[in-house]
Amino acid sequence: MSIKQQVLSAIQRLPDDVNFRDVNEEIALLAAVEEAEDDIRENRLVSNTEMKSRIEEWLIR
């Protein structure tokens, strides 16, 4: 399904009284999911252990 088709499908699922902000948030969610799927395909992942370590470093600073 093309991006345009995905967006149109998402908009059609929204209620009739939707506002522009809600539409924008729905499209942003679709974009985030697409980016995450790209990261998975490209093996750009961080393990839970590594992430916990990074968070601990952030909290110390």
Image (cartoon, rainbow, N blue to C red):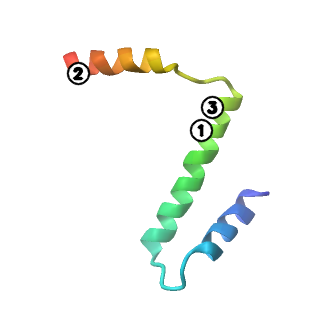
- Write down the residue under mark 1: 36
Q: Residue at x 59, y 46 (%)?
A: 33
Question: Is 1 located above or below residue 39 in the figure?
Answer: below
- Write down the residue under mark 3: 39
Q: Helix, strand, or loop for circle 3?
A: helix
Q: Residue at x 69, y 26 (%)?
A: 42
Looking at the rendering, in which quadrant would you find the C terminus?
top left
Q: State left or right for residue 5 relative to residue 56.
A: right
Categorize mark 1 by other alpha carbons within 10 Å: few (<14), some (14-19), many (20+). Answer: some
- Determine which quarter of the picture holds residue 38: top right
C-alpha span from label 1 to label 3: 5 Å
Disc 3 residue type (three-letter): Asp
Disc 1 residue type (three-letter): Ala
C-alpha span from label 3 to label 2: 26 Å
Residue extending farthest right: 1
Residue extending farthest left: 61
Q: Which mark is residue 59?
A: 2
Of the numbered discs 3 and 2, the one sitting upstream in the chain is: 3
Q: Are marks 1 and 3 in contact (CB under 8 Å)?
A: yes
Q: Helix, strand, or loop for circle 2?
A: helix
Query: Residue 2: x and y, percent?
Result: 77, 57
Disc 2 residue type (three-letter): Leu
- Using the rendered image of the protein, determine whether residue 61 is visible from the camera's viewpoint: no
